[in-house]
Amino acid sequence: MKYWSLIIAFVLSSIVVKAAEDVVFKHYDESIFVISNFSGTDATVKENKSVQQLLDVNIGGFRFYLEWERQQSQLMLRNAYGGSTPFVDQLITIRKHLEEKPDKILTLFLDFNVNTNELTKVVEESGILPYLYVHEPGNDWPTLKNMVETGKRVVIFMMQEHRNSPDWIHYVWDYAVEPYFSILEAPDFIGEFLKGDPRNNLLIYNDYNFPKRAGRPEESFFNTTQNPYLIEHVKNVWKSTGKTPNFIMLDRYQNWIIQVLYQLRSFQTIKGTVTFNAQTLSYVSWDGTNSLTSGKYCFPVGPGETVTLTPKSPGYQFKPETVVFEEPVQNKEQHFVASPLEITEGLEAYYSFENGAMDYSINGFDGKDIGVNYQDDSQRGMVAVFSQESHIVLPKAEDLKLRDHDFTIAAWVKVRSYNVEDRDISIIGTKGSSYQQSIHLVLRNQKPYFGFYANDMEGKTTLEPGKWYHLVWRYNKLTGEQSIFVDGKLDRRSLGHPSYKGRENIYVGIAGYNASTFMNGEIDDLVIWSRTLGEEEIWSLSKDLVDLAQSRSIFLRYPVLSKVGFIVVALLVLLLIYLKLPAGMGRRRYLSPEKLKELENTASDYPETNYIQLFGDFQVVDKEGKDITGQFTPKIKQLFLLILVYGQHHRKGISTKELSQILWPGLSYQNAKNSRGVTIRKLRIILEQLDTVEVVFNVDCWTIRFGKTVYCDYVEALQLLNENKEHNPEFFLNFYRIIRGGEVFKDEAHDWLDDFKGYMGNNIVDNLLKFIHLLDIDSEKDQELILKLADRILVTDPINDQALSFKLRALVLQNNMNTAKYTYEKFASLYEDLYGEKLDLTFDDLLRS
């Protein structure tokens, strides 16, 4: 027996050492720790060991329940049997262990309802404070090696949120998730967690705490199959969520967990990111699996496994599209880069109601209207007006690719009034009401409703009568997701729904057979896609940033115009070809040398006073020539930009409600109102120093009005683009003069700003490339300008190969071969970092293109 104990001890120590070697270079959020539920919170069995004994067996951390002892006036740690000891004593025990073990890393989960000041006092008294790690939100978690080297080896999470807590204690559900409990070996995962935001990186695994089967004797710790919730269960959770099971919670520590830990740490992993514009996506599904992850993922790979990764996310396509790893023998890293689909991708039907129920897509799915009127609305233009029994008959579900398929349906809706006797207000429906074979997209209880009958979901937002709302119903077949969006924002989402299998005609304004429901109000811009739109696309639709009219097939619908249209298009094509001819082949030079020289000699494009600069570094100079940029706090600057961009892109501006939701989310109505009022007043005081810029409030919407004497480069650029004078070569000179200061809204990273930045960025790339085509690259005078234009394009689009080609050619013509090759290598390296694959264009390819 003595020798058997020695063998066990030797094997245990060998496993621990080997595991430590494997994980030392991993990041904290890629590592796996065993956590003792020391206080027995919600425990099925109780922990027998002391804190010291658990530290001696190399525990990875503790969950402690703390309570305030009034008689002794001190913070106490409760154990699993109800007894308690001073918490400071246990912290001292942990500190001494850290001193003895310089490579030890611990994680503490604290349950407490006392003032954080009391906790701070105990932490300081114990001497453990220098070991505490502070995580900056938005930063990556450090490697374990880095934590050891810096001495920050203790991470503390609090299980309840406390205000004014010190920076070394982190609210756990801001960083971690906990899956729903499952007794299945391969638990189903539908993208939702018991606790925590799915975008959080850390995962708490609680499913090992299952009551021991009655009558079973103690088994060897080597037999890891004694419990059905061991390796395969945790591996399947890992696979389905794409998150490393960082914290395995144990109610009672037993030796078999070391072998489990070793096996889990021995898996090869495939990790990486799925990004758009260098930002990780929030929601990614993986074709052929039941995995639903955020844009940062990590998958385990068992012995002999082949893994195929094909990311899917609404509104995007990916490069690479698919990657296959055949039985990898080492850890792999794979990054996917998303690019947005065209809004017309998968567009099946578009009813603007400007010409009755005509379909303005290329498919020609015209509807047949029954008793529907069309009238001009002061906000939306021509709209369809419905009353009882009036409706529009659309083609069959199969023709619109709604049957057993992804789809998105969007519409602007205004209900005239709600009647007590009306069960539903119908937007889209079918005559039948069979399970999965009929569809109803309606308003029920004044809220949007989504269902295929007996498989339904109700939204959260109450829609007021007499007010326009943008509604979107989205179905994702791969995940079974039903989603409802109201005014561009996710209102309700549910997963695991089987697809719609109906074949009937689709109706606008009616649903049901025996108890038909009708539309009582107006509908505008009804659009049907046979794909899932992304959240950015849906938001853009709700802000009227997307022009679907570009998809109209005018020549097919108006044959009288087709001949004239064909002639016009032919002439334009010939003109475009002529303009793109090299100067040596007869292309006329449109830009005078005097204008180009004037552009080069202009040191600054801004006046000395009274201007706002939004390209490059943000700067505001008042009417006296004084720089007042420093008066804009981050919140005031956000408010200014938010009102500015909405006012420039939407005639009405931004509503008070939307303004508050973006800048003060989570605040009560009164608190948001107070914060909004104070910030707007401060902004107005600052803007009074210019002549003139005003914050205007009209019909619950905010805009910014500029006087004639104030200059704002962003507003000037938009006005120039709206004038659409690209046929005038001086347009390009003027446009470049405005935007050459640098990136628009530099250093401002906000979701609500992305579409506006994207709009300007696309115009910069397109127009500067056209500008380059007007120049003569063989002319020494033009080469410097071509280099500047190419550099400005690459600021906006760092992997634009057309701009790179022009830049390389100009550098080579200037005999700067080394600089050209360095530029190419730097571009190729960036391309590989972003796409995870090598650039397929060689240096010579780009010179010839």
Image: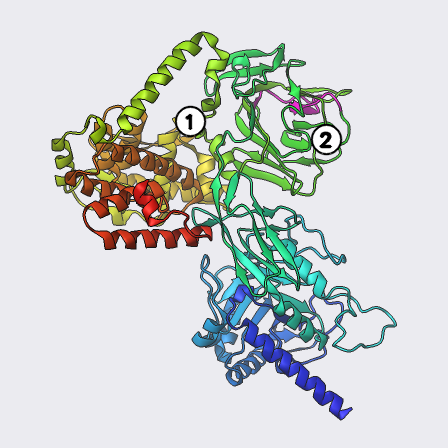
Q: Quadrant of residue 518?
A: top right
Q: Quadrant of residue 75?
A: bottom right
Decide if residue 121 is in sight here: yes
Q: Position of residue 411 (x, y in %)?
A: 56, 26
Quadrant location, the N terminus: bottom right
Pointer 1: residues within 10 angstroms few (<14), some, or many (20+)? few
Q: Which mark is residue 501?
A: 2
| As drawn, 728 above or below 559 | below
Please identify, in this view, whether the residue under mark 1 or under mark 2 is nearer the observer.
Answer: 2
Decide if residue 64 is in sight here: no
Disc 2 marks a residue whose amino acid type is Lys
Q: Quadrant of residue 499?
A: top right
Magenta highlight on residue 517: no
Magenta highlight on residue 417: yes
21 or 738: nearer the viewer: 21
Could you say whether the residue bearing mark 2 is in a helix, strand or loop?
loop
Could you say whether the residue bearing mark 1 is in a helix, strand or loop?
loop
Disc 1 marks a residue whose amino acid type is Val
409 or 36: nearer the viewer: 409
Is residue 490 left or right of 800 when viewed as pictured? right
Q: Which mark is residue 413?
A: none
Pointer 2: residues within 10 angstroms few (<14), some, or many (20+)? some
| As drawn, 528 above or below 556 | below
In the displayed orientation, state which residue is furthest to the bottom: 2
Q: Position of residue 426 (x, y in %)?
A: 65, 23
Is residue 617 left or right of 200 when viewed as pictured? left
Quadrant location, the C terminus: top left
Q: Which mark is residue 699?
A: 1
Q: Position of residue 591 (x, y in %)?
A: 18, 29
**Segment tinted magenta in the rendering:** 414-432
